[in-house]
Image: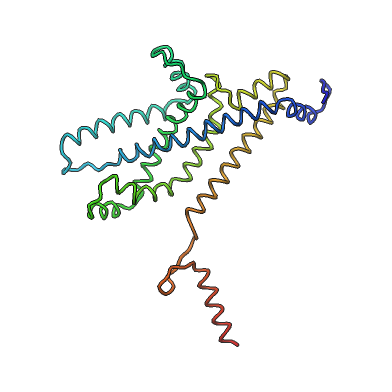
Amino acid sequence: MAVDANSSFITWVLYILQSSWPLFLRGAQVTLIISLSGTIIGFLIGVLIGIIRTIPIDHNTNLFKRIVLKIIDYFLLCYIEVFRGTPMMVQAMVIFYGSAMIYGIRMSPIFAGVFIVSINTGAYMAEIVRGGIISIDKGQFEASHAIGMTHAQTMISIVLPQAIRNILPALSNEFVINIKDTSVLNVIGVTELYFQSNSAAGNNFRYFEVFLITCIIYFIMTFTVTRILRYFEAKLEGPSVYTIHGSQTVPEAEIKISTGSKKNGKNH
């Protein structure tokens, strides 16, 4: 497709898509890989920190355990506050270049991107998970402890399944944010979608058309991810209304249908 300065806007968009689609595709792949990996690892970090920070400390806890837990909680709180209180772009620069200058550790841009997104997401997910755990009724903790379950057993078997279901919307929101925030990783040479879009724009000197295409690609990715995660949220929630019917628990809609059938039968 031939284009010149007098070509229409649509012609330029089609030309850029035809000539630069490999760049957009590679950039979208890197963006999804980093955001998905970072969200999963960050979620696991958040769960671990959430469990540790909700370990009960009372007068029955021995002094050594209380001191250790207080020290651990202090360091975890510092980690959360630092990574929630500073921009991801600054974190990327400090970690990527600082690790090379101070410790001689030279990470690949992709590995560094996953690492940075993971620990950043972990700081946010730690507070989200902690809030989800706290939201569970305290009677369930007391009941599990009364039958001799440890804190870890209570979390794994009783609390976490409920807490994860409650925080799933926040987790999906964090995933969407990570898809967009990977754009800042271009400062350390990660060839994600924004980086590749800059390359395509530099090749054609058509920045508006290129970044309009980029905007549409970001929207498609976030919209698709949101719809998929909402589907899983609905599956975890199950039917909205249940009513006791005889000795079984069945959806209320089925009861109305069966009741209506009996009434119709009497009318006959």
- Residue 201: x and y, percent? 69, 21
Q: As rendered, which of 99 and 60 lies closer to the eye? A: 99
Q: In this view, does 162 lie to the left or right of 212?
A: left
Q: In this view, does 152 lie above or below 120?
A: below
Q: Identify the residue shown where x is 51% and y is 54%.
A: 235
- Protein image colouring: rainbow
Q: Identify the residue shown where x is 54% and y is 32%.
A: 33
- Residue 182: x and y, percent? 54, 28
Determine the image quadrant of residue 199: top right
Q: Is residue 99 above or below residue 45?
A: above
Q: In which quarter of the image is the N terminus?
A: top right
Figure label count: 0
Q: As rendered, which of 248 and 62 lies closer to the eye? A: 248
Determine the image quadrant of residue 4: top right
Q: In this view, does 19 lie above or below 173?
A: above
Q: Is residue 206 left or right of residue 260?
A: right
- Residue 172: x and y, percent? 50, 42
Q: In which quarter of the image is the C terminus?
A: bottom right
- Residue 155: x and y, percent? 32, 47
Q: In this view, does 87 lie to the left or right of 133?
A: right
Q: Identify the residue shown where x is 54% and y is 37%.
A: 176
Q: Identify the residue shown where x is 38% and y is 26%.
A: 82
Determine the image quadrant of residue 206: top right
